[in-house]
Image: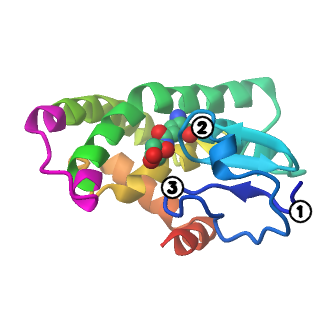
Amino acid sequence: MTDAITIQNPRNRGGSTGHVLAKRSVTFTEIRTNHRVPVLEHDGFVLWESYAIMQYLADMVADQTIYPISPRSRADINRWLFWCGQYFMPGVAILNWENSIKKMIGIGPADPLEVARGESLFLDAAKILDEHLGDREWICDTGLSLADLAIAAPLADQHSAKLPMEGRPNLQRWLKQVQALDSWKKTQADVQ
Ligand SMILES: N[C@@H](CCC(=O)N[C@@H](CS)C(=O)NCC(=O)O)C(=O)O
């Protein structure tokens, strides 16, 4: 059992994100059922899939506003979380792998065919999000929500992943707005 919530972080594999663990009950290898990070362990409860983790953590905070409990508000936020996993992340993941991670771990140059595939997927999804953000401050009507945080997170690597974000002014404006949040800056400082 632990006295603190642990989130296994991709940039700090096998360790915690800086939250101090009083005691560890399990090793990362034991809990990484899906062979991916992040994984949350909270008092013996193990949870993977980042959006499920975000929802769980939000639900534990009284009076939070980033994941409101009304069914329609939740449905709207959930819609964008599913959209992100299904349509936005595939392009981001390909470009991150080809343009950034392969170089970082020294396994050769980017594959141009894969880069083209990633760019095409990314551009299709970015267009939809950019248009959606044209007349709104945040992705969902209830204000800043888990949808903004989940979708902005992979864009932190936009330069190293060479994500084609040019010509998407609403997306750029929204991302700057997320990155200007105090909570965002605090988290970024922890992972750098
Ligand atoms: N849908 C999953 C994706 C998890 C995922 O693909 N994580 C990557 C890092 S961002 C990973 O663990 N890759 C394998 C590795 O790095 O060993 C989630 O949102 O948690």
What's the amino acid at mark 3? Pro
Q: Nearer the viewer, residue 142 or 189?
A: 189
Image quarter of residue 73: top right
Label 2 secondary element: loop
The answer to whether residue 101 is above or below residue 46 is below
Identity of the residue drawn at 58% across and 72% down:
190
The x, y position of residue 90, in whole percent, is 36, 32
Q: In the orientation shown, which residue stands out farthest toward the left?
A: 112
Q: Quadrant of the N terminus?
A: bottom right
Q: Which residue is mark 2?
A: 140
Identity of the residue drawn at 20% across and 51% down:
107
Q: CA distance from mark 3 to mark 1?
A: 22 Å
Q: Which residue is mark 3?
A: 10
The x, y position of residue 57, in whole percent, is 77, 48
Q: CA distance from mark 3 to mark 2?
A: 27 Å
Q: Which residue is mark 1?
A: 3
The answer to whether residue 158 is above or below residue 53 is below
The answer to whether residue 56 is above or below residue 169 is above
The answer to whether 106 appears left or right of 151 in the picture is left
Q: CA distance from mark 2 to mark 1?
A: 34 Å
Whether disc 3's CB lies below 8 Å from ligand 1 is answered yes
The answer to whether 5 appears left or right of 32 in the picture is right
| Label 1 packing within 10 angstroms: few (<14), some (14-19), many (20+) | few
